[in-house]
Image (cartoon, rainbow, N blue to C red):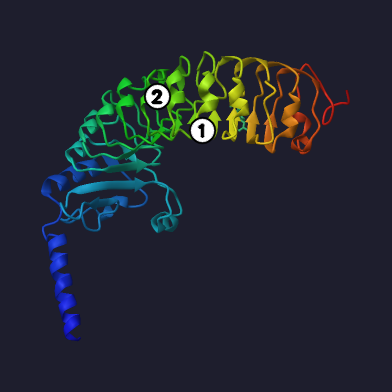
Amino acid sequence: MGLTGVTLLITLMVVTAVTFPANGCPPADQAALMDFKAALKEPYLGIFNTWTGSNCCQGWNGVSCDPTTQRVADIVLRGESEDPIYEKSGRSGYMTGSLSPSLCKLDRLTTLIVADWKDISGEIPACITSLPNLHILELIGNKITGQIPANIGQLSKLTVLNLAENQLSGSIPASIVNLGKLKHLELSNNQLSGEIPADIGKLGMMSRALLNKNKLTGSIPNSITQLRRLADLDLSMNQITGSLPAQLGSMPVLSILNLDSNQISGSIPTNLLSSTGLNILNLSRNSLEGELPDVFGSKTYFTHLDLSYNNLRGSIPKSLSSAKYIGHLDLSHNHLCGPIPNGSPFDHLEASSFANNDCLCGSPLRTC
Ligand SMILES: *[C@@H]1O[C@H](CO)[C@@H](O)[C@H](O)[C@H]1NC(C)=O
């Protein structure tokens, strides 16, 4: 080894010694992790087998530490992933037990992902809202019960809140609108009730809001249309009433809007159907009425447009045949009448797209 080689080696050793203090994981963090482990049972994969020895920052499955402070920063335990450990065992993750409140002692935690373990029950420890650095909280796919902690809004750095596919009940806490950095809110498939906070429009960074498959009531807050970054909104399969906010169709980046299976009434706002950014629109199984506005055009591009099972009347607007593309169209189970327009967007559609209306006619239905 030449002189430069030796110098490089020495430099490396010094840098390494400075960046990774030999002492590693602080005993308090280690103890908190041991409590966390003790409250869970993972019988098949041996996820926690590596959680031994005195340095939790090294080689503990799913645990990582901040390199400078050596404090526990991330816990990432996914029951479904590409990790070879799952392939080897030929099954996905399964865990019972609950989330220990000792987690809240890990006050440098930025990421907590305990996802898709199917059978983790108990409640979300309320003290979790005292973790000042938490950026990502993902507990999707377990059997967590109880309510979302009331002061969840205290987590001022939170960008991802994913509690979908659990058994959470109660309402969406009012404080949630204080999560000024929140980008993804996923609460789908729980038993949440009550209304969507009226000032949800304060979540200015939000790009995805999935609240489908709950028991939410009340109407769609008007303020939601102020969310300039919202691209994907799913409120389907709730008990939402009232009419559609007129400005929904003017949201700059909204491309997926699923509001199906609710009790929404009133007419479909004109700008919702003339919107060129919206590509998936499902309003199926509501109580929408009135006529379809004649506002389609050469920029209309829907991969899915499902307006089935409503009380729509009148005829199918001729302008719909000038659409650039309509993948899946469903106008069935309404009270539409008159000739189905001709044109390329309709060529691939089957009779089922138009079935069970009052008096529609023309291809693919009977001739007029
Ligand atoms: C729209 O929603 C209905 C009812 O929830 C569902 O059955 C249907 O498959 C959805 N349509 C599309 C195109 O996804």
Q: Is residue 38 left or right of residue 216?
A: left
Q: Quadrant of the N terminus?
A: bottom left
Going by the numbered disc 2, the residue's amino acid type is Gly
Q: Which residue is at a point 18% across and 71% down the rendered structure image?
A: 12
Return the x and y of residue 218 as percentages of the image width and height.
46, 14
Q: Which residue is at a point 50% across and 17% down the rendered structure image?
A: 240
Relative vertical location of residue 123 with respect to residue 110 in this rendering, above or below = above
The answer to which quarter of the image holds residue 201 is top left
Instruction: Give the residue at mark 2.
Output: 201
Relative vertical location of residue 183 with respect to residue 9 in this rendering, above or below = above
Going by the numbered disc 1, the residue's amino acid type is Leu
Whole-angstrom CA distance, mark 1 to mark 2, is 14 Å
Instruction: Give the residue at mark 1.
Output: 254
Q: Element type at marker 2? A: helix
Q: Which residue is at a point 66% across and 20% down the rendered structure image?
A: 309
The one nearer the camera, 319 or 123, is: 319
Mark 1 surroundings within 10 Å by alpha-carbon count, few (fewer than 14), some (14 through 19), many (20 or more): many
Determine if residue 319 is in view. Answer: yes
